[in-house]
Image (spheres, rainbow, N blue to C red):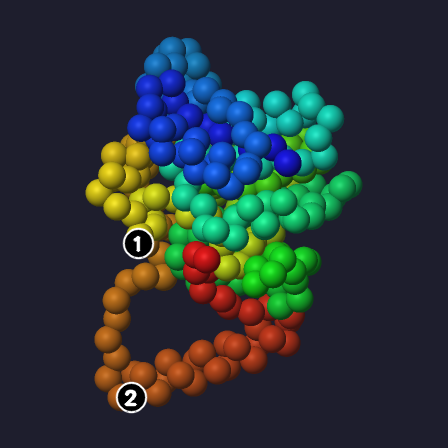
């Protein structure tokens, strides 16, 4: 087991918070210098401008290049898979068991998300693996964030080969089902998730606030972070209609071997 932890050179607070936690959990790790997008030359940034009408921000480009570094480190090793982690991740007490027992396909390109943005997601009803209270299921809907994931060699090779063609933020490129499947990459999700980014964790303390502020990809306001969490109120008729809709949807999903699950942190 190996964690490649992406961390900007000046992210002292984040490393000071994270390293003792990783040691306490007994998780082998190495810090990988993150790429600061705003420090890239104009020529380097221009390579990305033509790819999308929206364009990637310098922070998003830096984030992408940081993850590419980790894929290359995996491919330069003899490990069958590794974990790629950003330095603002928090781990639950069960994270050690999940990371230690997680299985990954050998020949099939695959990534497994271990974090949650605290939103519902579509998952395969039959799990690929069970680890205690955690199920590893195929992810069938988009789930934002690249806080921590496992990636095998086949997926690292596939993604490294096409990263220069990526036009969207890296989590969209990796975890949007249509884009992932087009590259032949299967995406799994651990549910409940044993990891969460500090900015999403309700239990963070005042001491965690400085570490929770986004560093890599700071310009990005991810709409996915709030997806599915808008507060709505329904009258009696509206509530009854929603219950009927949810019941019909549940039957439809079940018939296709799917389920909708809230991705909680535990």
User: Where in the figure is residue 63, as x and y percent of width and height?
Assistant: 43, 29
User: Where in the figure is residue 26, as x and y percent of width and height?
Assistant: 55, 38
Dot 2: what SS? helix
Q: In this view, does 266 lie to the left or right of 155?
A: left
Residue tagged by mark 2? 237
Seen at 46% across and 57% down, the residue is: 266
Residue tagged by mark 1? 202
Seen at 35% across and 87% down, the residue is: 240
Query: Marks 1 and 2, how far apart in space?
Result: 33 Å
Q: Give the label, 1 or 2, closer to the camera.
A: 1
Residue farthest along the right direction in this orientation: 107
Q: Say which quadrant the N terminus sits in.
A: top right
Residue 61 visible in the shown view: no
In which quarter of the view is residue 54 placed? Answer: top left
Q: Is residue 68 left or right of residue 59?
A: right
Q: Badge 1 local density, few (<14 within 10 Å), some, or many (20+)?
A: few
- Between 110 and 77, the residue placed more toward the observer is 77
User: Where in the figure is residue 230, as x and y percent of width and height?
Assistant: 28, 63
Up the image or down, 20 lies above or below 175; here it is above
Dot 1: what SS? loop
User: Where in the figure is residue 21, as x and y percent of width and height?
Assistant: 43, 38
- Between 212 and 117, the residue placed more toward the observer is 212
Seen at 38% across and 11% down, the residue is: 41
In which quarter of the view is residue 215 placed? Answer: top left
Dot 1 or dot 2: first in sequence order is 1
Residue 81 visible in the shown view: yes
Up the image or down, 46 lies above or below 243; here it is above
Seen at 25% across and 34% down, the residue is: 210
Mark number, residue 51: none
Task: Count up the numbered dots.
Answer: 2
Q: Badge 2 local density, few (<14 within 10 Å), some, or many (20+)?
A: few
Whether pointer 1 and pointer 2 mark residues with C-beta atoms closer than 8 Å, the reply is no
């Amino acid at each position: 087991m190996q964690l490649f932890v992406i961390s900007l050179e000046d992210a002292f607070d984040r490393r000071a918070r994270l390293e003792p936690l990783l040691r306490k959990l007994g998780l082998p790790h190495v810090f990988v210098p993150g790429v600061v997008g705003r420090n890239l030359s104009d020529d380097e940034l221009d390579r990305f401008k033509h790819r999308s009408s929206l364009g990637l921000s310098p922070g998003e480009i830096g984030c992408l290049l940081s993850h590419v570094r980790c894929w290359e480190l995996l491919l330069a090793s003899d490990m069958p898979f590794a974990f790629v982690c950003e330095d603002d991740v928090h781990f639950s007490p069960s994270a050690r068991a999940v990371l230690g027992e997680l299985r990954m396909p050998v020949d099939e390109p695959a990534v497994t998300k271990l974090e949650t943005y605290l939103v519902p997601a579509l998952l395969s009803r039959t799990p690929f693996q069970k680890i205690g209270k955690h199920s590893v299921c195929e992810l069938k809907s988009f789930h934002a964030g690249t806080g921590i994931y496992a990636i095998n060699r086949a997926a690292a090779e596939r993604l490294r080969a096409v990263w220069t063609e990526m036009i969207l933020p890296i989590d969209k490129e990796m975890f949007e089902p249509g884009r992932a499947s087009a590259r032949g990459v299967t995406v799994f999700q651990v549910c409940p998730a044993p990891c969460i980014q500090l900015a999403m964790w309700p239990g963070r303390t005042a001491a965690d606030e400085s570490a929770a502020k986004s560093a890599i990809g700071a310009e990005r306001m991810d709409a996915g972070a709030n997806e599915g969490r808008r507060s709505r109120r329904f009258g009696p008729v509206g509530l009854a209609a929603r219950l009927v809709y949810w019941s019909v949807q549940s039957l439809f999903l079940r018939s296709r071997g799917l389920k909708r699950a809230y991705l909680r942190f535990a």
